[in-house]
Image (spheres, helix red, strand yellow):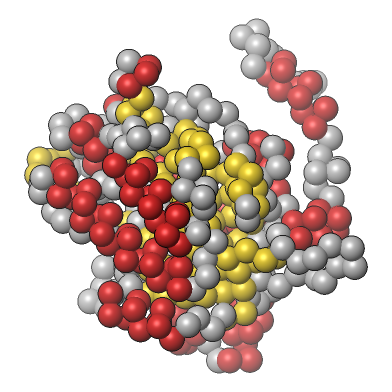
Amino acid sequence: MSATPFESLEKTLEKHIPPEELKEVKRIMFGKDTKTIELPQCAVEAAAERGFDLQGSAFSASVEQLRQPRIVRVGLIQNQIVLPTDAPVIEQITALHKRVGEIVEVAAMCGVNIICFQEAWTMPFAFCTREKVPWTEFAESAEEGQTTRFCQELARKYNVVVVSPILERDEVHGETLWNTAVVISNSGSVLGKTRKNHIPRVGDFNESTYYMEGNTGHRVFQTQFGKIAVNICYGRHHPLNWFMYSVNGAEIIFNPSATVGELSEPMWPIEARNAAIANHCFTCAINRVGMEHFKNEFTSGDGKKAHTDFGHFYGSSYVAAPDGSRTPGLSRTRDGLLVAEMDLNLTRQISDKWSFKMTGRYEMYAEELAKVVQHDFKANIIKE
Ligand SMILES: NC(=O)NCCC(=O)O
C-alpha cells in the first residue's frame, strides 16, 4: 500500500479525468448516472462526529400510468472491528453492537427502510485461523440470541427491516453452526433466516472448518417495503444462486460479504452488478473494511508464508440496479453508511424492456442440467 491510501476508484477518476471526458467514462463504466440525495444535516453531522462516511444516491425509474412508484430506501453498513481480536468475546460483540447501533441511528435519520450489515458482523473474520476457540463462541441462536434481540430493538425503534448476518448456533440440530442472515421485520418480529449456500475453499477462507452449507434454499422475505433475499458472500460467484432468489421473486438481493483485496477486488464491481442486470432486480454488495490481526500464525496450504492477518478488507460497498446503473462505492478504508433510494417499479420496467426471464428458455436448461448431474453424464461434444 502507498502512503496515501487508495480511497476509491471513483475519487481517483474524478481527480484525474477532465470533466467532459469523465462524464463519458462514468457513463460507460457505471451506467446511467445516479442522483446524489441530500441527506438531513443532523445525519451528516452525526456521521462526521462518529467517524464514518455517509453517502446517498437515488436511482431513477419511469412514471407509470397504472402503478404508483414504490420508493424504498436501503442502508448498507460497512465497518471495521472495534476491539482487538483477543479481547474477551462478549466485549467484542458488545462493542460491535454499539458501533453499528450508532450508524443505524443515522440511517434512521436518513429515512432508511431496510438495513443490511456485513457478513458475520458481530465478530472478526476469524475463519482464516482454522482454530475453533474462541471463534465458535461468537455463534448465537438466530431466533433468540443477544444479537437478534438487539436487532429487534433497532427494528422497532426505527421502523426498519434489519438484515443481520451472523454465525448461527443451531441447538435444535446438534449444535450445528451455520453462516446465516436473520431477517427482522420492521415490526420487530423475526421474519425468518436464510443460510449461506456456498462455502469458500479459496486462499485463507477456511470457512468449511466452522459451518455447513446452508439448507434453507432460496427463500425470499416479503417485507412491508418489498421482497428481499440474502445471497451471502461467496454465493455471489454463483450466477444460479442469484438467479434462484430472483426466480422466487426477490426485488432486492443483499450480498453481505467479507473479502480481501488480493483475492477478489477486480471481481467485486462486476459480480453483484451483473446479477442485477441478469435478474432484473436490485443488488446490494457489502464488504467489511480494515485489517484484522490474530494472535497465532496460520497457513492455508497455498504456499504463502505463515501470517497473522487476512489482508485488507476493501469495503467498496455499492448498490446496483436492473438497468445496469450503480451507486458510487463507499470508501476502501473507512466505515460507512450508503443510503440508496430506488423505485422497485424499475424491476418490471427493465424486465419488459430486456425480457431476460421471458427469453430464458429455462425448460431447456432444466432438461440439460438434469442430465449433467447424473454420475454417468457424457459431455455433448461432437468429434470428427
Ligand atoms: N466470506 C467469504 O465467503 N469470502 C470468500 C471470498 C470471496 O468470495 O471473495
- Is residue 78 visible in the rendered image? The answer is yes
Q: Residue at x 28, y 34 (%)?
A: 139
Q: Residue at x 26, y 46 (%)?
A: 123
x then y, percent, for residue 255: 50, 49
For the point 23% across and 32% down, which residue is it?
Answer: 136
The image shows residue 346, relative to residue 382, as above or below, that is below
Image quadrant where residue 126 sits: top left
Q: Which of 348 and 221 lies nearest the eye of the viewer?
A: 221
Instruction: Between residue 4 and residue 228, name the one nearer to us.
Output: 228
Query: Is 374 placed above or below 262 here?
Result: above
The one nearer the camera, 52 or 171, is 171
- Residue 172: percent from left, percent from top: 37, 18
Left or right: 5 with respect to 268? Answer: left
Horizontal relation, residue 233 to residue 239: left or right: left
Q: Residue at x 68, y 19 (%)?
A: 372
- In depth, the one of 280 and 101 nearer the eye is 101
| Residue found farthest to the right | 65
